[in-house]
Amino acid sequence: MGTVITVTSGKGGVGKSTITANISVGLANVGHRVVAVDFDIGLRNLDMILGLENRIVYDVIDVMDEKCKLQQALINDKFSKNLYFLPASQTKDKTVLDKEKVQKLVEELKASFDYVIIDSPAGIEGGFEHAILSADQALIVSTPEVSSVRDADRVIGIIDAKSLKAQKGEEVEKHIIINRLKPELVEKGEMLAIQDVTNILALPLIGVVPDDEKVVSSTNTGEPVIRRPESSSGKAVKNIVRRLLGESVPFMDLTAESKLTAFFKRLFQ
Amino acid sequence: MTLIEKLFGKKDPQSASVARDRLKLVLATERTTNNFPFMEDLRRDMIDVMKKYLDVQDVSIKTDQNQKIDLLEVEVSVGKDGDKK
């Protein structure tokens, strides 16, 4: 049986889909059978980040409504034979989902994949509840900004209330991912530091992804940044994947440029 | 910025520490309402029960968190005869 990992955040626009895509590619690259599922019904996005938007025929709602077989809706990745993608519906109302159907689908996916990575919609309403329902693990993505950390805190507080695992007396394993960290701002004291965020959210950290222009160009071309191992963000997500697999990987040194360089930069501003 | 300020790096008040403090404050209050969503009902029920025995004016419940213990402080204001109309 596969493991279900839900990527969530509360606040929108913090990089949930990007993280989902990258982790899915990363896990598939090391040989696991992975399916990435977009649960953001009505606002499909994971397809573009994975570069698979032109291959969609059926979506997740079609499968749940039994309009097609699961195999018909699953899209194989361009590069990795281990990676499949199940798109969100673009047209249908998100209220069509119900818990039994969601649970049945995830069980079916768990039977044929090692990892089911679910991209949760923003918010704490129905869509989020469906995305977290069958989760074994939750990755909470937050940027080092007050609104994002606040919403992350809110989401963490309700994950267990909404998950089947917690109803059975077990706990959903939760980890923090800090996204878009700008080391030079942290250094200046103008951005919350890693420690600040983890202290406030009181959960273990599984990765820090620095703010990186490469992520933007990767999304532009539809090739997740993890495929560019030379980039700092690519390295960071690769480390997250290794930690998910139980490896103990030291955190990257994300301190900004040396004091001396900063001094000269300031001088010649 | 003057040259002196440039040389020594003028210290502005750091916004990250402000963010930290604001977050801690707002989350402290939000977490208690998350933990006790029934607070208002509880307060009303307490007033109803105590009214059987006392001339209750008001009940206020304060929450406090101490390490892993949630603390509820209940303050009951009882009316004096003279205040009664």
Image (cartoon, coloured by chain):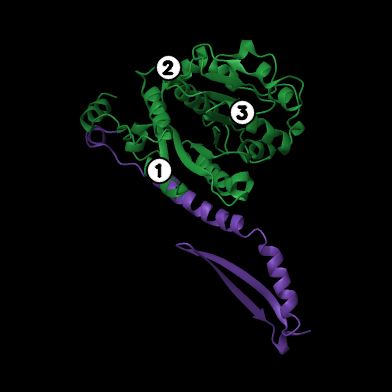
Q: Quadrant of the C terminus of chain B?
A: bottom right
For chain B, the rendered hue is purple
Mark 3, Cα crowd under 10 Å, few <14 / some 14-19 / many 20+, is: many
Mark closer to the observer (3, 1): 3
Q: Which residue is mark 1?
A: B16
In the rendered structure, the answer to whether residue A183 lies left or right of residue A161 reads: left
Mark closest to the chain's N terminus, 3 or 2: 3
In the image, what residue type sits under mark 3? Leu
In the rendered structure, the answer to whether residue B56 lies left or right of residue B7 reads: right
Residue A250: x percent and y percent? Answer: 31, 35
Rendered residue at 65%/40% (across/down): A129
Q: Secondary structure at mark 3?
A: helix
In the image, what residue type sits under mark 1? Ala
Mark 1, Cα crowd under 10 Å, few <14 / some 14-19 / many 20+, is: many
For chain A, the rendered hue is green
Position of A81 relative to A149 (above/below): above
Rendered residue at 22%/35% (across/down): B4
> In which chain is the residue bearing label 1?
B
Seen from the viewer's position, the closer of residues A62 and A204 is: A62
**Cα distance in 3D space between marks 3 and 2:** 25 Å
Rendered residue at 47%/22% (across/down): A28
Q: Which residue is mark 2?
A: A227
Q: Which residue is mark 3?
A: A109
Residue at the limit of the structure toward the bottom, as seen here: B81
Label 3 close to label 2 by CB (< 8 Å) = no
Same chain letter for marks 3 and 2: yes
Q: Quadrant of the N terminus of chain B?
A: top left
> In which chain is the residue bearing label 3?
A
> In which chain is the residue bearing label 2?
A
In the image, what residue type sits under mark 2? Arg
Can residue A193 be seen in the rendering of this structure? no
In the rendered structure, the answer to whether residue A49 lies left or right of residue A259 reads: right
